[in-house]
Each structure stands twice: as structure tokens, then as C-alpha cells.
Amino acid sequence: MNEQRKAILDMLAAGSITADEAERLLTAIEPGEAPASGSTERPKAKAKYLRFVVGYTENGEPGRVNIRVPIALLRAGVRLSALVPAQALEKANAEIAKSGVPFDLTQLKPDELEEFVNHLDEVIVEVDSPDAQVRIYSE
């Protein structure tokens, strides 16, 4: 057994790293070998971005909007919204409602956002219609 492999197994035995982390490290030092679980897939990393992709047709011409929002920006925005006076949030909600978006900024809570972020890797939203395709997912 080589020294790197032994060091990784010692860290695992000591509880310094998890089994998943040990598997990733072992795979990194021995790229020719498959992980012990028999899976050739890389473990999925925590979501860092929320991606919105919209394909549409306007006047017969295809178009595409591709937006990548850092999860950290969502977290910061929710924390900052706690500093905004209630009257300002009400005015913002009214303007958002005028645009036809039923969204209430006063209901954003940091704890709820964290729960949402923790489950983002499981979320994929796809909408297909004759005029547009929408895909929302995390990466």
C-alpha cells in the first residue's frame, strides 16, 4: 500500500474525513481505478449556482436567455431583505404584482432559504410549450 493511500485510510479511521471524502481522495490519487462502490459517477457537489434557461420564439426568430445566479447571492439577498423597512417591501411587492408575478418579499426567511438551498441538487423544473421552453436547475 502506498503512503498516500495509507494516509487517507488513517484519516478515515480517525474520523477526520467521511467515507465519501475518502473515496474521492482515493479516486484522485488512483485515477485508473473505479471507486469501491462500483459506480463510475462522480459524487455530486453541493449546488453553487441556480441556472435559468429560457428558449423562446419572437416574431418567428428563436431566442435564448441563460441566467446563472450564485447561491451565495441568494443568501446575501435574503439576509439584506431583513434590513429593508416593511413599507419599502410592500411597495416592491405592489410593483412586482403589477408585473403579474405573485411573489411576496415579506415572506422570505433565511432559514427557509437554507432549506431550499440544501435541496437544490434535487430540483429540476422543465416547462415546454409551443412558444417557449424553460429549464431551471442547480449546478
Image: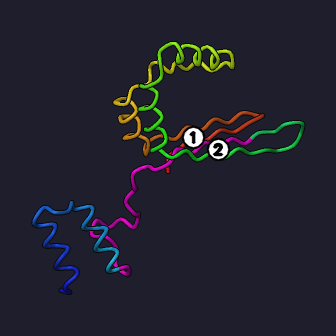
Quick check: 38 left or right of 130? left
Quick check: 47 left or right of 134? left
Q: Which is more N-terminal, label 2 or label 1?
A: 2
Residue most toward the left?
Answer: 14
Q: Residue at x 50, y 48 (%)?
A: 49
Residue 62 place in picture, x, y as percent: 82, 44
Dot 1 corresponds to which residue?
136
Q: Tell me if residue 13 comes above or below residue 132 in the rendering.
A: below
Q: Residue at x 16, y 63 (%)?
A: 16
Q: Tell me if residue 42 comes above or below residue 46 in the rendering.
A: below
* Amino acid type, label 1: Ile
- Residue range highlighted in magenta: 31-55
For the residues labelled 1 and 2, the Cα–Cα distance comes to 6 Å
Is 46 or 78 nearer to us in this picture?
78
Quick check: 61 left or right of 122? right
Residue 70 place in picture, x, y as percent: 51, 46
* Amino acid type, label 2: Val
Dot 2 corresponds to which residue?
53
Residue 48 place in picture, x, y as percent: 46, 50
Q: Residues within 10 Å of mark 2 (few under 14, many from 20)?
A: some
Q: Residue at x 47, y 18 (%)?
A: 85
Q: Is residue 114 magenta?
A: no
Q: Where, quadrant-wise, is the N terminus in this rendering?
A: bottom left
Q: Is residue 33 magenta?
A: yes
Is 139 or 92 nearer to us in this picture?
92
Kindly indicate whether the residue at mark 2 contacts the one at mark 1 (C-beta within 8 angstroms). yes
Q: Tell me the element at label 1.
A: strand
